Image (cartoon, grey):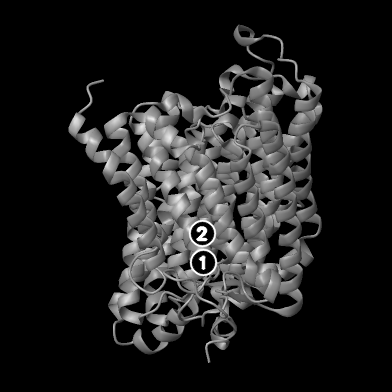
Amino acid sequence: MIISWPILAQFFTALFCLFFWARRDIQRILSLVGSFAALASAIGLLLQVQEAGIQVMQLGNWPSFAGIVLVADLFSAIMVLITAFMGLMIALYAISDIESGQEAFGYHALYHFMLLGVTGSFLTGDLFNLFVWFEIMLVSSFVLLSLQGNRPQIEGGMKYVILNMLASLTFLSAIGLLFSVTGTVNMADIARQLEVVAPQYPTLIIALAMMFTLAFGMKSAVFPLFGWLPASYHTPPTAVTTIFGALLTKVGVYAMIRVYTLIFNQLDTLNYTLTALLLISAFTMVVGVFGAVSQFGFRRLLSFHIISQIGYLIMGLAVFTVASIAGTIFFMVHVILAKAALFLVSGIVKQLTGTNDLKQLGGFYNNNMALSMLFFIPAMALAGIPPLSGFWAKFAIIKAALESGSYWIVGVGLFVSMLTLYSMVKIWTYVFMRARPEAYDKPLEPMAVNDRWLRWTPTILIGGLTVLMGIYAGPLMALSTEAAEQLMAPAQYIGVVLGGAG
Amino acid sequence: MNRSLILMTATRYLVPIILMLSVFILLRGHNEPGGGFVGGLLAASAFALYVFAFGIKEAQRLLGVHPLALIGSGLFISLGSALIAPIFFGEPLMTGKWIDTFELPGIGKLGTPLFFDIGVMLVVVGVTLLIVFALAGEDEQLGGGS
């Protein structure tokens, strides 16, 4: 039963926010209480999965081949937990960051519907249901993105909508084709059927794998399908950018990892697709980081970094060993935290100065040491400086790549790491170290005490976690390895899901 | 606005018929094609027709509540019916629970799936009318509390 709690918590929160449509104060409290409930149930779920193995719930008590099934293995549980944690943090930050006009248009309800979609995507064991959760997530994110309705938002939102619709279409057609081969949309059942069917249609299976890669790749902004991300992510309020950057692209990566480990794990398919994935990951990393280096907007630069980090995640998947998948899971949690912390700092800077343009910023090191540290730590973590979380994350993936003999991708990864460091130093120099250009030197906006609490608490907590992740890298890596072992040995997953089917 | 007498007169007769038909379709969804989604679309089309004939203000007066309230209560009813099984019987979410002892004439057995469907119907009516009202020109009411 606990497997459905994170979903229900988000659902009820969104629902009650609808009921109190006109009462923004109540919505804020509901949003916090609901996020807290989601976090508590996500922790409960992770503990349960660790203790008792993969959790399954047959919705409606239908046999699993006929009905929709919720499944939580360790990977799902970890992702649900990080989603709930980020949900609570950003709910806190949003109270200060979101203007009352947007709240009146249902910001809080939409926010929790989006988190509902994300949580559901992580927990479902049914391919068509995954599509539905994706849509819940995307439709709410479309609105969140353009809630202020100004020109750049509508422009970015259009690209976002059109490309993601295209991805959904591809995803849906791929589900249809897969259904025509296997006669089921239950992922575990598909995997079991493919063991028999795949040798008959080897090329069709490869084509299907590539269709899923295309669909999920577009959603997770890999090369060359990332155009929508930098066009749209810097336009909404910081709270929205942060939760988008932290979670939405990762759902695409999650889905990719899920279908590759569970469904398209035949040797023939893998030989073809993993090479493609490796190339995609290299281009994604390089293009993302070059895009970032050339930017002069604080948030635009960080948005390009999302793309580059997705490249690392895909690289971990493409190497396709237990160690590399474990590294990917660890990396995913690390990058969610580090990137969110940086976005939140950019939001504070924006609030203090009224601008996000690097050329107009400066002098923060001298007059705001605490904020500088809050930027510096996650930035170094992102660049992969030991002993912070990013170092262990990259170390794990690169070590796994070396062990499997993909030397050139290691070279690319390290090169991109250098450029990541360079672009972080660029922000560091422009915003923090140098004096503010005289032309733009005006006093900082005062921040109300409330705002200060609401903005600093999540920023400090998330930034602190990137440090803790570095210190407790050992146990966390052990957990990721356990999750990766579950992923790479799908027989257990299939057995648990279909066990009830008889 | 220029109103058509024929359309207004016809609408007065058609709206109750369409609404009754939508309830019929909803209940028919038990065992045959039909159900909350189609029923909801039909009911919404009745109100849309009313908008064409009498304008938005009149249609909103006929509806009596804000479409958002319909969406909220519909979701609540559906979710509530899904939670009956886990709370009272310890079975998975959304398990259908039926009262076996009696049947209502014309409706059949009562059970949680019926309420799930009623919830779906309300959501569909709410969403469709929200769009219809917005498209028909009165977007100021969308702001709600502002």
Where residue B102 appears, as percent x and y from the top left, is 54, 77
Density class for disc 2 (Cα within 10 Å; few <14, some 14-19, many ≥20) is many
Q: Report which quarter residue A302 is drawn in.
A: top right
Q: Amino acid at mark 2?
A: Val
Where residue A84 appears, as percent x and y from the top left, is 68, 53
Where residue B30 appears, as percent x and y from the top left, is 42, 71
Q: Amino acid at mark 1?
A: Ile
Q: Circle 2 — which element?
A: helix
Q: Which residue is mark 2?
A: A253
- Whether residues under marks 1 and 2 lie with C-beta atoms below 8 angstroms apart, the answer is yes
In this view, the residue in front, B107 or B28, is B107
Measure how far apart labels 1 and 2 are at the Cα level: 6 Å
Whether labels 1 and 2 belong to a single chain: the reply is yes
Density class for disc 1 (Cα within 10 Å; few <14, some 14-19, many ≥20) is many
Q: Which mark is residue A410?
A: none
Quadrant holding the C terminus of chain B: top right
User: Is residue A460 visible to the viewer in this orientation of the structure?
Assistant: yes
- Left or right of A372? Residue B111 is left
Q: Circle 1 — which element?
A: helix
Quadrant holding the N terminus of chain B: top left
Q: Which mark is residue A257?
A: 1
Where residue A488 appears, as percent x and y from the top left, is 57, 77
Q: Chain of mark 2?
A: A
Above or below, A136 relative to B94: above
In this view, the residue in front, A22 or A433, is A22
